[in-house]
Image (tube, rainbow, N blue to C red):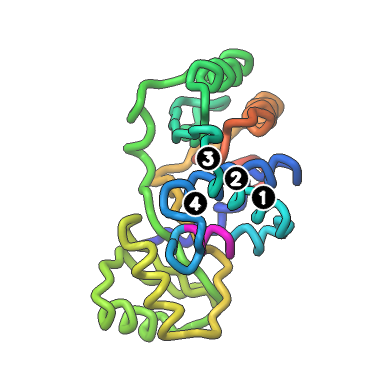
Amino acid sequence: MGRSFEVRKLSMAKTAGQKSKLYSKYGKQLYVVAKNGGAEPSANPALRSLIEKAKRDQVPSHVIEKALEKANGVGGEDYVPARYEGFGPGGCSVIIDCLTDNNNRTITDVRNCFTKTGSKMGAPGSVAHSFEHLAILSFKGDNADEVLEAMLTAEVDVNDVECENGQVTLFAPTTEYFKARNALLEAMPKVELDVDEITFVPQTQAEIAADDMPMFEKFMNMLNECDDVQEIYHNAILPSQG
């Protein structure tokens, strides 16, 4: 389905902050997932998957343990997800996912990022329609047929399985993420996943002109500095990547 191009851009489309930001991001996500589904990883597949992802991103165990202890406690913050959409520098489409305990603070912070870079914040749904919300699992290999067979056997609904440049990539509806992941790891226990996430994949790309790059970088940096921002997705192709 020709999505491998976008998959190669995943590292670009999701901007990573500094380590402290990364730890804070995982701390919040782990807290929310543990609070909602229980702090015992063996009984909470979403938490188990998130812990594995955090470890792959080299989040220290004490950060993980602290978040789980916090979730086990009484009270604590009540984080809720918030999603904002709009058009960034150069006309690119942007989706920003946040976890917040204060909606007014978060929307003000995010709106400032748009305003101060000449960007335009849109209404909910204004750009999401131009992205596909997908579960993506990708690993080194050439056995796409075997993967598809494993999914059929486990009755997992998949959008596509691609094999390109020694990389097998499975696309599935977000609702099938855990089922697909479990079926894959059961069929191929030794597989090491290079991409293991639910993400927004752009259906169209926007080329950013060299003149727009300073403002685009400022926009991304400002968003990354917002404590409540968890993930940033965009459809920009930067000049050096075009």
Badge 2 is on which residue?
A: 70
Q: Position of residue 91 (x, y in %)?
A: 50, 27
Gap in Å between the C-alphas at discs 3 and 1? 14 Å
Residue 26 appears in view: no
Cα distance in 3D space between marks 3 and 4: 13 Å
Dividing the image into 4 quarters, which one contains the N terminus?
bottom left
How many residues crowd around disc 4 within 10 Å: few (fewer than 14), some, or many (20 or more)?
many
Q: How far across and down, in percent of the image, does residue 152 sit?
A: 26, 79
Residue 219 as seen in the image, left or right of residue 191? right
Q: Of marks 3 and 1, which one's residue comes earlier in the chain?
A: 1
- Name the amino acid, label 3: Val
Chain part drawn in magenta: 47-52
For the residues carrying marks 2 and 4, which lies nearer the camera in this image?
Answer: 2
The residue at the far front in this view is 74
Q: Which mark is residue 34?
A: 4
**213 in relation to 240, above or below:** above
* Residue designated by label 1: 66
Sequence-first tag of 2 and 4: 4
What is the crowding at mark 2: few (fewer than 14 residues within 10 Å), some, or many (at least 20)? some
| Picture residue at 49% right of the left edge, 34% below the top | 79
Is residue 11 shown left or right of residue 168?
Answer: right
Q: Secondary structure at mark 2?
A: helix
Mark nearest the camera among 3 and 4 is 3
Question: Helix, strand, or loop for circle 3?
Answer: loop
Q: For the residues labelled 2 and 1, say whether their Cβ atoms are less than 8 Å apart.
A: yes
Instruction: Judge whether 166 appears above or below 232 on screen.
Output: below
Task: List the residue tagged with mark 3.
Answer: 74
Q: Quadrant of residue 229?
A: top right
